[in-house]
Amino acid sequence: MSHTPLPPAGTITDVAGIEVGHFSDTRRPTGCTVILAREGAVGGVDVRGAAPGTRETDLLAPGNLVERVHGVMLAGGSAWGLAAADGAVRWLEEHGVGMDVRYGTLPIMPAAVLFDLPMGDPRIRPDATAGYAACEAASRQPPAEGNVGAGSGALVGKLFGIDRAMKGGVGTGSVTVAGVTMGALIVCNALGDVIDPDTGRVVAGARTADGRALLDTRRALLRGDLPQPLLAGTNTTLGVVATDAVLTKVQANRLAMVAHDGLARSINPVHTMSDGDTLFALATCRAPSTGATPGMTVLSAMAAEVVARATLRAVRAAESLTIGSLHAPAARDFARPPP
C-alpha cells in the first residue's frame, strides 16, 4: 500500500559533518543504522532506561581520555546486534578514519541496541557485515524513516501484551537557531505509547483488547488496569542528537542528558525497568564562526525539541507489518481524519 510521505521536517544530516546509513535485513525485520562523523565529533551519552545494551559508553564520560568519536551504531538484535559496530570500525579503518594510536588508525564507534527478536527468526540479527553495509550506504542525503535500519523490527505499546502493540521505527528532524543546527535521529521501540507533544494525543501504542482503537496506556494504568508480565530489556528507544555547535565533552554529555526531555514529552511511560533508553550527543564543531552562537540553554531546548519531533516521526513514518500471527498496525492506520 502506498502512502503520502510526511512533510519535510529537517534531518540529522542537516548538521555539517554528519552522515547516516541504514542496513535493513531482507530475511526478517531487523537491521542497523550508523551515524557517521568521519572528521570526528565531541561525544556524550546519557542512559536512562534500566535495561541498556551498549558498547564504549564509558569512554564518553567527561573525565575519561577519548575526546572525539567517529560515529554511533544503533542496531536491532538485542546484545547480539552490538557486533554491527565491528563492521563499522572495519569500514572506517579501511577509509583512514580514526584516532592515531601510533600502531594504527583506531575508529571510535560507540553503539547501542534494541530488542526486536519477536519479529521473525530471532537467530537472524545484525552482525559485522550488516554494520559494514550500513557504512557503505551512508551519505549526507536525508535518511529514510519508518521501517528501515535499526527500526525495521521496532514495536511500541507493549505494556498490555505484544499482540496489542503497534509498529515503531526510525525518525529524524532538525532545527536551526542563530546559525547553529541541531538534528536528531531516533529509533523508537518503546514499551509505552508515543504522544504528540503539541496535542497530548496518543499517536501509537497499546491497543484495546479488540485491537481496533488506541488504549491510552497512561490512563489505563492510573485507573488500575494491570500490565502483562514483562521480559526485561525487550524495549528501548535509542537515538543521537547532533549539532555543529562548538562544545566541550562536558557540554556534549549535558546535551545528551537534556535531550531525554524530548523522550519524556513524546513517550509515556518512558525510562522504565524494561527499556534501555540511550541517547548519544555529537558535536561536529563546524558551525559558522560569524554571528551569535546560542548558549547551552538554547541548545538544550533545541535538543529536546528535535528528539520529540523525531520520536513522533518514527511512528508516523512507520508502516504496518505482519509476521506470522503477529500483526503490528501503524499510526497512519489509526490517524483521525481532519475536522
Image (cartoon, rainbow, N blue to C red):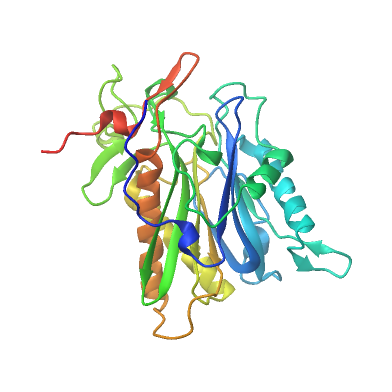
Could you tell me which residue is drawn at 40 percent across and 76 percent down? 179
Identify whether 6 is placed above or below 162.
below
Which is nearer the eye, 294 or 4?
Answer: 4
Image point (65%, 67%), residue name: 40
Q: Residue furthest left?
A: 339
- Out of 238 and 317, give the one closest to the viewer: 317
| Residue closest to the eye, 39 or 218 | 39
In this picture, is 119 found above or below 201? above
Measured as percent of width and height from the top left, residue 265 is found at 32, 52
Q: Please identify the quarter of the rendering in which residue 116 is found.
A: top right
Q: How many marks?
A: 0
Q: Residue furthest right?
A: 103
Residue at the far top in the pictured view: 325
Between 169 and 263, which is closer to the camera in this rendering? Answer: 169
Residue that appears at 67% across and 25% down: 123
Residue 23 percent location from the top left of the image: 60, 40
Q: Is residue 197 visible?
A: yes
Of the 4 image quadrants, the one containing the N terminus is top left
Please identify the quarter of the rendering in which residue 131 is found.
top right
* Left or right: where 211 falls relative to 100: left
The answer to whether 66 appears left or right of 35 in the picture is: right
Left or right of 121, for residue 177: left
Q: Is residue 298 left or right of residue 122?
A: left
Is any atom of residue 75 visible in this view?
Answer: no
Q: Residue at x 35, y 59 (%)?
A: 305
Residue 151 vertical position relative to residue 159 in the rendered view, above or below: below
